[in-house]
Image (cartoon, rainbow, N blue to C red):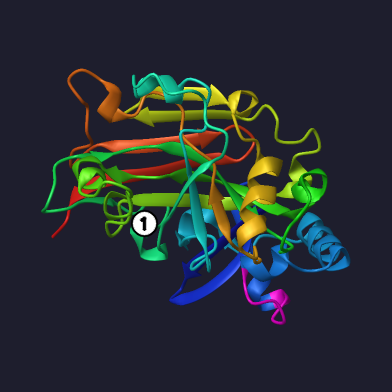
Amino acid sequence: MKLITYTHAGISTWGAVVDDGVIDLGQRFPELDGVAALLGAPAQVLADVNTLVAGAQADCPLSAVTLQLPVPAPKKIFCIGVNYAQRNAEYKDGSELPKYPSIFMRVPDSFSAPDQALLQPHESRQLDYEGEIGIVIGQGGRRIPADQALAHIGGLTCVNEGTIRDWVHHAKFNVTQGKNFHRSGSYGPWVVTADEFPEGYGNLHLLTRVNGELRQEDTTARLMFDFGHLIAYLSTFTTLETGDLIVTGTPTGAGIRFDPPRFLRPGDVVEVEVVGVGVLRNPVEQES
């Protein structure tokens, strides 16, 4: 299923996308408080929702709704740095491949909704894109064994982990400032449930385009730390909860890596595509 959170006729709710229509699941399953609640529900509940979606008529066309972040306020958002095989070489510092994942955190309001503008802040002209795959946790847990970790994935989403490049260098040991500017990134347009990936997550295809030009392209076959490893590692030091978001890393080709750098400007359009998930689209605007 493709699960969305959206507004229609002035009412915020959640539902499933089928073809070009939307099925209102908030109305049909009032006991479930949104997309995250469904992802964390028992298997029988998921099966019941799948059955209903397969036989239901759309309540409205997809074009008639305003998409919100599919999981509007995850309790925790983990971002993984330098996770594709060639990314470490981009830094040209002679360092060996990392033994452990590089991790930083984001806050929910650093993300714009799908189709909503990314904001170039007044403080910088170095807004950059980073196309990534996001894991949304279904069943939570602590100290999850690696061989059981994939069962804790509720679904996948597309992420633009937008970055203000000069602000990530304001401090010696963290990048928090440059990774959390208001509405500098985005995720969505929906969460595709884990049952839609029967072949697993080992060869997912990720692409990023700016104004139609392909800038990034890679597959999860080249991740240094795969999805199972990340879930096991993160759950060692914290309890993963339903709806938590893990942003799994970006390939080579971000704007900062061009000579000269190619940062985003107002009027640009960024698309992050994950084959089998969808396309996340955001224009860029100057912050007012």
Q: Position of residue 36 (x, y in %)?
A: 64, 66
Disc 1: CA contacts within 10 A as few (<14), some (14-19) or many (>=20): many
**Residue under pointer 1:** 112
Residue 1 placement, left or right of 190: right
Q: Write the residue at 44% across / 36% down.
A: 131
Query: Who is closer to the viewer here, 260 or 266?
Result: 260
Residue 233 placement, left or right of 182: right
**Magenta-colored span:** 28-34
Q: Residue furthest right?
A: 44
- Would residue 158 be seen by someone viewing this image from the given angle? yes
Q: Position of residue 194 (x, y in %)?
A: 74, 48
Query: Who is closer to the viewer here, 168 or 198?
Result: 168
Q: Quadrant of the C terminus?
A: bottom left
Query: Who is closer to the viewer here, 42 or 52?
Result: 42
Q: Position of residue 83 (x, y in %)?
A: 52, 33
As for residue 164 lying within the magenta part, the answer is no
- Would residue 22 be seen by someone viewing this image from the given angle? no
As for residue 33 lying within the magenta part, the answer is yes
Q: Write the residue at 61% across / 60% down.
A: 237
Q: Is residue 91 above or below residue 35?
A: above
Q: Write the residue at 32% across / 48% down.
A: 173
